Image (spheres, helix red, strand yellow):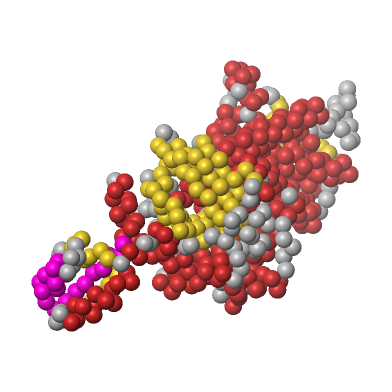
Amino acid sequence: MEAVAQISGLTKIFDGKTVVNDLSFTVQKGDVYGFLGQNGAGKSTTIRMLLGLIRPTSGDISIFSHSIQHKLEILKRTGALIERPDMYKYLSAYEHMWIFSKLSGIKPNRDRIMQQLEMVDLHNRSRDKVKTFSQGMKQRLGIAVSLVHDPDLIILDEPTNGLDPQGIADMRHLIKRLSTDHYKTIIISSHLLSEIEQIATRMLIIHKGKKIIEGSVSELLDPADTVVQIDAVNNEMLKNILLSSGYQLVDAENIRIKMNRQSVPELIEKLTREGVLLTGVQARHSLEDYFISLTNQQN
Amino acid sequence: MWSLFSIELYKISKRPRTYIAFIAITAIVGIFQFAFKADGTNYMNLMLQSVQDTFDLDKTKAINGYFMCYIILNTLLIQVPILVALIAGDAISGEANMGTLRLLLTKPVTRTQVILVKFAASTVYTIMLLIWMAVTALFLSMYIFGVDDMLIFRVKGEESQILQITKDDIMWRYIAAFGYAAVALSVIAALAMFLSIFAENSIGPIIATVCIVIVCTVISNINLPVIDDNVKPYLFTSYLVGWKGFFYIGTNADGEPIKGSLENWPAIRNSLLILFGHIGVLLTASVVVFNKKDILS
């Protein structure tokens, strides 16, 4: 595998406060790399350091085998969307694309610009001024602007901030498309863990500026360790059957057990056979549970 | 670099705020022209009160296009720094406020390029303002009031002077004066842009620039030897009105004006050098600070 970004010992101290602490990770070509952490965990600071917007206190950043000191070489092949750009309110979507094409060293081409606007579903509003756009539209335009020079690496910092549920779903599909159809390497930071769970192939969880864990999403979400929440008409009966069958309750009040996800159908069949009237079964080992358990350990 | 520069100019041209200054200048010049057309002779009587027994002047001829432009520039060039600060003070802080600064800096451009290009664009804007002033205050006044020799009223030390410049010796002085004003106003642009690096909305740097100009102008007008010798030479505001030097015509031993001459060219040249020095220092400081700045907006 070819490493697109290699970060080692990255540290940033603001006014004596360590915001990012000795962070090291590697992003491979083709990864959709989820960068997870609570608000204030140091995600945005790290991403800004990757883009040369913030100077690291110490540590090394190498992207496309160039040190961050050679920022221009990196930025020629990188597209970025940092949080919520409001864009130039007095310019249209088309003008933004035209301007940022030129800034990226690309000769603006009408057909190409319209194609890129179509990708983010803004082609019908291309001549409208950004001040008439919703936050979701501005965010989509931000994505289009970051893709204007067809970069190999796309860095998205909280791209779903301020979007409605439909906007979040659209963004998710767009990111998936960029990865699968256009073979882009993507680094995406978010505090919306369910989003990362659906998009990322690999991920890093940071907490208070420190790396907690890094790995592939499938590894981290071990199906053998799934928490299953069960609800029945008679919960006491359900509890007794589970305990007598050797299951351990991780949460007695809500009746949650730990088990292999693949065995859930067998358990449902057994409980039904025993006469338990089930009202709900939910496999809850999501990234969210995993994240909360990890950060709780750290706290 | 050229692409970045053309983009900056394009952005400035698309902003409604850009045109406020042009509208303000048009309005002020228009009011002056209307007032002098309606009641100019009264103004001249007032100005010539102390010397009308000595000189025999045709007051209707004295109010001509050249004279009008001089009067307007005297008033307007004190206010124009505010208009320049409106644009230059927004150069970096406005981008930070909109969240476009980080977008801009994640494109393959250096921060030094960004600063230099934004300053260049602010300078072009300043020059465009001055050209507009020339069109409205000079050429339009020449059309409305006609052309004749120009009278300049000057207070030099304890005495009042009236200088007369022949009409065929004036246009080059205006071109030079507008050129000087462009350099002087570029100092304001450089100052406003420097301040805008520290802010995340444009109000702060605009107000700070105006405050600095006001404070320095007040100090420049304090006539105390200790300030004259130790402070004034270093204040850019001491040189803002140096454009007037182009209208102070040189005289021969008999006190006769010499056509095409200047009373004190070395003083004008030194003023220009000091203004360029200020621009250099402010631009260098802007580049250094901006290159070290963490973009947190």
In depth, the one of B230 and A260 nearer the eye is: A260
Q: Residue at x 37, y 45 (%)?
A: A208
Residue B291's place in the image compared with B30, above or below, is: above
Task: Indicate the position of residue A9 as horizontal and vertical percent values.
Answer: 49, 40
Q: Residue at x 64, y 18 (%)?
A: B229
Q: Residue at x 83, y 50 (%)?
A: B147
Query: In this image, A106 relative to A34: left or right?
Result: right
Q: How many marks?
A: 0
In depth, the one of B99 and A106 nearer the eye is: A106
Residue furthest front in the image: A245
Task: Indicate the position of residue A255 as horizontal and vertical percent values.
Answer: 18, 67
Q: Report the span colored magenta.
A: A225-244
Query: In this image, B237 relative to B250: left or right?
Result: left
In depth, the one of B43 and A61 nearer the eye is: A61
Residue A233, picture quadrant = bottom left
> Which image quarter is the N terminus of chain A in?
bottom right
Residue A81, picture quadrant = bottom right
Can the viewer see residue A86?
Answer: no
Task: Indicate the position of residue A222 as horizontal and vertical percent values.
Answer: 36, 62
Task: Indicate the position of residue A234 as horizontal and vertical percent values.
Answer: 11, 76
Residue B226's place in the image compared with A178, above or below, is: above
- Residue B131 in the magenta stretch? The answer is no
In depth, the one of A249 and A122 nearer the eye is: A249
Residue A31, picture quadrant = bottom right
- Residue A228 in the magenta stretch? The answer is yes
Can the viewer see residue A260?
Answer: yes
Q: Residue at x 61, y 19 (%)?
A: B230
